[in-house]
Image (cartoon, rainbow, N blue to C red):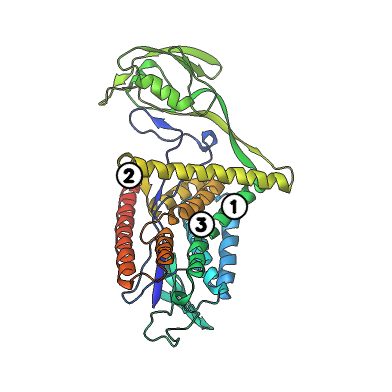
């Protein structure tokens, strides 16, 4: 039996514009924050039975599956429209539902591409574990299983009990390289289309979010007993000047201030501070850290607010959607580039589904507009990462198909199984490790 199972993928959560200058501090109120962007890059997990050659997953199928997709999409749209106005377990469940729906869309792309080409499919399962509900329609057995984070589709190609002849032209393994490549690529395409749909909904419902910057940087938190507290800083202060450096009204304001403070360890600095309607002059001497750079014991945040621009007609909405998609895709690609080129320092930011659900839950409680960004960027991440030519990812299967096309014949079965199985095991180990680490971080 050909089985490839899809589970929630490990991902990367990029840092926000907030910078810590000593001990971590609590994030300020959501009204001061940018729309949240959570970059998810992570491997796709494929599970193969020992007697299988190749496999393709899916959460949803034609017939009943189409209805289920509609329910999932409607539920996700309802959550987006309401801004997840829920607290505690409810928001966590909603975030979990959105993550599951995104994975479902990816797998539905694979499944629909197979069905539309007339390729045999024998099983379709939502979730893993023991079945809660199961029924058969046509050649496909549908089931709802106990653990909802994933699903699988079974193909009859290598099932020893299959009633199909080995040379049946509608078996997946007997289709051309191009047809199989379409099935593999369809998941990525589905996520891209879903991301575009989410962003189109965003610009038409809440508008395109855009940060407007004011001069200075916000001081939301101060470390007790630290340099800043002794110098007279208070939460809510806005730093307008550090020494001779006037803080600009642009996205670089936080890193610029951080760099200035770090460059003056044990060197007194004069800070011009706005406190309400009053401007003050405070003097603080940055303490030298272990790396020799200066710090004053505050967290800094961009002095900005979010404004929403509504489109003027369908054409404008399409243009705004494209621009927002390009921006988020650039964020994902830049995060992936940082991981590939500087893995040691970025490894700590790789997160699994536990951290993603936690991030989604926090956004659900605080930021309706940011939730669109969260859903879109998760889709884009899933699409980008699955194109990587790595074992157990869609890109890995495409690479094998490319080699097959270059050779003019199929690759040795043992080679394909060995490559994909080893990749699968690595992804499973990574996924479990990240889940454990993320859970411990939340405790």
Q: Which residue is mark 2?
A: 347
311 sits to left or right of 23: right
Residue 366 seen in the figure: no
**Tag on residue 83?**
none
| Residue 255 drawn above or below residue 146 | above
Identify the image quadrant of the N terminus.
bottom left
Q: Position of residue 388 (x, y in %)?
A: 42, 54
Q: Which residue is mark 3?
A: 98
Q: Answer yes or no: do the residues labelled 1 and 3 have beta carbons within 8 Å? A: no
Q: Which residue is mark 1?
A: 196
Q: Position of residue 186 (x, y in %)?
A: 52, 63
Mark 3 residue element: helix
Mark 1 residue element: helix
Pick whichever, 376 or 322, lies toward us.
Answer: 322
Q: Nearer the viewer, mark 2 or mark 3?
A: 2
Pick whichever, 78 or 230, lies toward us.
Answer: 78
Pick whichever, 226 or 183, lies toward us.
Answer: 183
């Amino acid at each position: 039996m050909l089985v490839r199972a899809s589970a929630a993928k490990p991902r990367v959560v990029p840092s926000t514009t907030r910078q810590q200058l000593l001990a971590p501090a609590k994030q300020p109120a959501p009204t001061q924050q940018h729309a949240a962007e959570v970059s998810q890059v992570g491997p796709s997990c494929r599970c193969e039975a020992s007697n299988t050659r190749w496999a393709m997953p899916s959460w949803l199928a034609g017939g009943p599956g189409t209805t289920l997709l509609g329910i999932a999409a409607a539920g996700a749209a309802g959550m987006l429209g309401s801004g997840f106005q829920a607290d505690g377990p409810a928001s966590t469940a909603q975030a979990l539902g959105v993550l599951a729906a995104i994975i479902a869309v990816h797998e539905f792309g694979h499944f629909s591409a197979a069905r539309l080409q007339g390729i045999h499919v024998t099983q379709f399962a939502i979730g893993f574990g023991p079945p809660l509900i199961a029924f058969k329609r046509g050649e496909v057995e549908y089931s709802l299983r106990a653990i909802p984070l994933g699903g699988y589709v079974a193909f009859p190609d290598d099932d020893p009990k299959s009633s199909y002849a080995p040379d049946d032209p509608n078996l997946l393994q007997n289709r051309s390289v191009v047809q199989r490549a379409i099935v593999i690529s369809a998941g990525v395409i589905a996520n891209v289309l879903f991301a575009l749909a989410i962003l189109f909904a965003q610009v038409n419902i809440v508008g395109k979010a855009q940060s407007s910057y004011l001069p200075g940087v916000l001081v939301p938190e101060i470390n007790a007993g630290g340099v800043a507290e002794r110098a007279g800083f208070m939460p809510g202060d806005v730093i307008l000047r550090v020494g001779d450096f006037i803080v600009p009204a642009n996205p670089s304001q936080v890193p610029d201030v951080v760099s200035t403070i770090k460059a003056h360890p044990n060197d007194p600095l004069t800070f011009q501070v706005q406190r309400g309607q009053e401007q003050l002059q405070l003097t603080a001497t940055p303490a030298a850290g272990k790396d020799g750079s200066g710090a004053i014991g505050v967290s800094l945040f961009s002095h900005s607010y979010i404004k929403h621009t509504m489109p003027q007609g369908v054409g404008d909405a399409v243009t705004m959607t494209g621009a927002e998609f390009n921006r988020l895709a650039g964020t994902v690609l830049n995060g992936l580039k940082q991981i590939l080129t500087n893995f040691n320092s970025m490894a700590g930011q790789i997160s699994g589904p536990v951290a993603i659900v936690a991030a989604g839950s926090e956004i659900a409680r605080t930021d309706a507009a940011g939730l669109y960004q969260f859903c879109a960027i998760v889709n884009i991440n899933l699409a980008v990462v699955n194109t990587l030519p790595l074992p157990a990812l869609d890109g890995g299967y495409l690479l094998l198909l490319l080699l097959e096309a270059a050779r003019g014949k199929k690759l040795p079965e043992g080679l394909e199984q060995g490559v994909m199985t080893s990749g699968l095991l690595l992804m499973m180990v990574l996924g479990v490790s990240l889940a454990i680490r993320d859970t411990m971080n939340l405790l």
